[in-house]
Image (cartoon, coloured by chain):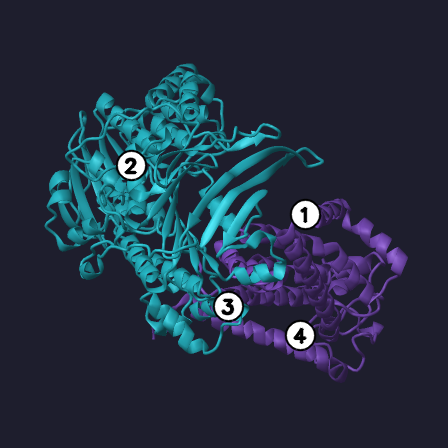
Chain colours: A purple, B cyan
Amino acid sequence: MSAFKSFEFVAGIVLIALIALIALIGGAVLLSPLLFPGGGTAQSLVDRLTPPFQTWEYPLGTDPLGRDILARVVVGGRVSFFVGISSAIGAVAIGTVVGLFAGYYRGVWDTFLMRFADIQLALPFILLAITVIAIIGPGLDRIIFLMIVAQWVQYARLIRGSVLSLRRAEYVQAAQCYGLRDRAILFKHILPNAMGPLVIVGTPNVATNILLESSLTFLGLGIDPLIPSWGGMLAGGRNYIQTAPWVTIFPGLAIMLTVLGLNLLGDWLRDRLDPLGRTT
Amino acid sequence: MRNLSFRVPRGGTLAIVGESGSGKSVTSLAAMGLLKFTGGRVTSGRITLNGPDGSTEITSASENVLRRIRGNRVSMIFQEPMSSLDPVFTVGNQITEALKLHRGMTSRTAKDEAARLLDLVRMPNARQQLDRYPHQLSGGMRQRVMIAMAVSCRPDLLIADEQTTALDVTIQAQILQIIRDMQAEFGTSAIFISHDMGVVSQMADEIVVMQGGRMMETGRARDVILTPSDDYTRALMAAVPRIGAMTGRDAPRPFPLLGEEDIAADHAVPEQAEPLVKLEGVTTRYDVTSGLLGRVTHRVHAAEDISFQIALGETLALVGESGSGKSTVGRTLQHLVAPVSGWILYRGTDILSLDPEKRARFKREIQYVFQDPVGSLNPRRTVRQSLIEPMRVHNLLTDPDRQVAELLQAVNLPSEHADRYPHEFSDGQRQRICIARALAVDPGLIIADETVSALDVSVQAQVINLMMRLQAERGLAYLFISLDMAVVERVSHRVAVMYLGEIVEIGTRRQIFENPQHPYTKRLLKAVPVMDPDTRPERVDLSGDIPGPVRPVGNPRRPHGFVEIASGHMMADDHQLFEQEQQGEIQA
């Protein structure tokens, strides 16, 4: 009926397809060691820079070291996905808790935390990264930690801003009137209404963190460069972009689709969380 | 909106009245040719503007023609004075812009003209005001700027869309006076869009009554107000609170709404030995800090030395204009803010000195119902969730389904609606839900902070009747905070008038309304627009604005005592000071 004509319905179908695609990639991330025993690291210099769609052996071609791009995209998804999502979730979680309490209770802690946040925002990320990695050393877990440290601030500020206006909302005051505990007010009444912007800012952050991981790796501050990751592939293919564009195109496409899917997922989630349904 | 037709004579005033969603504002946008910016269009019919140089068809005019008309021959005053002035430009910039555009003035002459216009709207120190920004002006002053802008190009037609709704009554009276002066001076026609029948009856020659996009009735203002012929108009007029309607009655009584005439009986307060709540010398101040170290330099004297008591089943109304501290008193009573000094006794117990655990139990006894029907319910929780939560907090939950159903029935809502979200209800229904939520914990006192002022008149009357019925059934006491004197006259047993954080007069409703003593009370009552087309209002004093309650540290207002005028009727003994202050402002 008319449902098929509605924009939301069509967008919903496309969205579900994309989510399925991401799920497929996610599944492949788990299965990849079985499908690609070489793990995307096996080199074959004879086959270096094979263009895509030429042989069954290398469906998406090979890179300058003769490594299978398909295998590297799928295996690399493991690292990129993990880094991108876990760092974003970590930063959101810490930033949310800090922002909620700072915004609700105000006072000395609020001033202290927000001035601290200002100072941190004034530090260039690379400087912070070099300092932190120099102290704790490189590694996958370390760069996730680094990203959380660098990014919780923006979420804390975002949430604090919403809380500052929501704590004056009459339904929050009404809850105070009937004696609801502060913690319940924060998590039942304030947080759900402050989530919207968080989802909007948080989902593209996954993408920037996937790219950030590659920059860090490129600078030697990230993970072992031999472990395939999408960001690392982009960085590695940079010099061949004129002669062998496929080396960068496929990991780039993987990042783009993932981000698009996540953004649509974020929008859908925000609308689902909003009882007003369609917000204009 | 369909099939609406009316004409506004030159120099005459037409009022479009109706409740929200009736299509009043759409009409005004159509007349300005602004509909397309809001996604609407005129599908049929014509809007014609007749001027000395021929007539213009607004519906078919090009955007270029319309741009020349807007602000020049037709101008509009909007409701919200803060958002209709651009905060990044000075007042002078904004007035001169239209003058330069439509009247081809140079910067210098435009500035002179702007100063003259501000003078015309009785802006004190007009020339200095040109360099100020909108946020530095009070709401009433901003409205004066809006009017100065609107009349700057001598428009043929002035459209005022609820332009005094957001203002205090004394300021509203000033603004209405200014508009009348402008009309007399320039021969401007005006369309007044309003839901306030008092304002309409004072300003309009003709009235159009609208409902759901249709015109229900039109005619001369006197006829529509006094002898409405349409059923809807009649119902509307019955719901309008009229000041003076309760003269001679001791107890409040509900509105005689159609179909509810039988409940229109007096609500007397039962005799009792001890008051339910008693406030003694309660003072609440907010600190204003400045500088890096956050030093306290000023204090907002929001409530000073407040003493009153409320008996079980009684309604005490707290009236006053914005900044008078009415809400602060309510919030202090509810522990939303802590007072600096004073006692609050509830059934004889001093609740401020209780330990936190016992005080939490007292939170049950006093409940708050807020003004904003949209903001006071969490949009992400169903009605059931909102109603259950307070009961769960106080361990009153025994049979959730039955309790929720009973609460909804008590406020005349179908219990099937429990699983809906707030946005699925109308404003009046949401306000009923808020009342149900307050009732959930079975309180003794409900603080109704402007609870009905955001509602349409007919809904307002229903909610007031509901509140009065609940009072009779459950023996509730109300602290009714409002600036609508007509509503206050209808609902209250006793009235306290607040000015700058202090109670200046307190007494029974009859004492305050029929024999006001304090100059501020008199001024407040005089400013209320009366819905009586036969009496045009007296000229209002155009000078004076309400001063703010912010004072430097170490410079408190001189405390005042009370003189007793009659039994239970008290007035501040420094009323001469008030008059001097008002005089002083005129000189300044």
Q: Mark 4 points at which residue?
A: A53
Q: Is residue B566 above or below residue B125?
A: below
Q: What residue type is labelled 2?
A: Val
Q: Name the residue under label 3.
A: B389
Callouts 3 and 2 in the same chain: yes
Local crowd size for mark 1, using a 10 Å CA cut-off: few (<14), some (14–19), many (≥20): few
Local crowd size for mark 3, using a 10 Å CA cut-off: few (<14), some (14–19), many (≥20): some
- Asked which secondary structure carries label 3, the reply is helix
Q: Which residue is drawn at 54% across and 67% down?
A: A269
Q: Which residue reaches farthest bottom?
A: A34
Question: How far is disc 4 from disc 2 in space, using C-alphas?
Answer: 83 Å
Q: Can residue B60 be seen in this view?
A: no
Q: Quadrant of the C terminus of chain B?
A: top left
Task: Give B261 or A251, whichever is nearer the viewer.
Answer: B261
Q: Which amino acid does label 4 sit on?
A: Phe
Q: Mark 1 points at which residue?
A: A107
Question: How far is disc 1 from disc 2 in space, using C-alphas?
Answer: 43 Å
